[in-house]
Image (tube, rainbow, N blue to C red):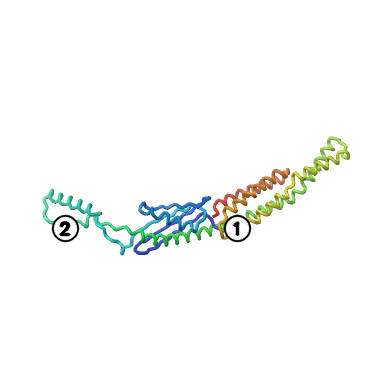
Amino acid sequence: MKSMTGHGRGETAAKGVRAVVECFSVNRKQAEVSLAAGRELAWLEPHVREEVLKRVSRGKVQVSVAIETTDDSVHGLIDRSRAAAFLKEAKALQKHLGLSGEISLETVLAAPGVIRAGDPSERDVLPAVKKALGLSLDALLEMRVREGAHLQKDLAKSLTRMATMVKRVRTLAPNVPKRQRENLLRRLESAQLPIDVMEPRLATEIAVFAERCDVAEELTRLDSHIAQFREALKSDAPVGRTLEFLAQEMGREWNTTGSKANDAEISRVVVDAKAELDRIREQLANIE
């Protein structure tokens, strides 16, 4: 199981190009990829997105790319317009100051901006970026796995607490009809009604109440959801959506249990279970 939060950095040099790639990921319901790079590298976006989506199924991943040429790969390019402008200004200054002498080619080439480093070709950039991106994703996923292991332990503890609550409700539930019968008998006695005459109607009332407050099916489904949740936690595949569905179904069963039970003590257990389920949902928001 993996978290959706992570960071990774990769750096490589190939064919005179040095590439540095950093990946940052945060939680999102779907997979999103964004590229942070200069305008001249915008063409990399579909390549970066394709590589990221091969390895990430959920979460927003921001990829930062920086490119520079190594010293042995710089090819000088002459900016002719800058060179001509510099020479023109230099001659004008020479005339203005009344100076003699020739303005050499070396002087012109040494002027700022006349010689600039050539940009590496896309053919050279792409392999370096892909390799650096792969290293960055390796580190990102490794961090997501470590974070996922911590989340897994925390969720397992929450499930243990919730299973204990299910057992508690299962213990309390059979006593609810009995207490209802006792309450009805006390009311009949306080009203000084002939209980023997009312007993058949009392039995019918208790039977209807017992059926209405029976939560056995809900507790059985909760046992099943908890067991499936535990199994999913052991999976290496993306299970975030599966766990979210199971949490939703557990919430539904606890709501039904609380509304049917008609018992103060069971209601307190249901409140605690729903609070635990809220904590589970907060953790699930960060699971791939």
Number of numbered discs visible in the structure rendering = 2
> Which one is nearer the viewer's eye here, 267 or 281?
281
Identify the element where label 1 is drawn.
helix
Identify the element where label 2 is drawn.
loop
Relative image position of residue 9 (x, y in whole percent): 44, 59
What label sits on residue 104 in the rendered view? 2
Q: Residue at x 78, y 43 (%)?
A: 208
Relative image position of residue 227 (x, y in whole percent): 66, 56
> Which one is nearer the viewer's eye here, 62 or 179?
62
Q: Quadrant of residue 153?
A: bottom right
Relative image position of residue 225 (x, y in whole percent): 65, 53
Q: Residue at x 18, y 53 (%)?
A: 87
Disc 1 designates what residue?
233
Indicate which disc, 2 or 1, sits on the residue closer to the N terminus.
2
C-alpha separation, residue under disc 2 versus residue under disc 1: 75 Å
**In which quadrant of the rendered image does the C terminus lie?**
bottom right
Q: Residue at x 33, y 62 (%)?
A: 70
Q: Amino acid at mark 2?
A: Ser
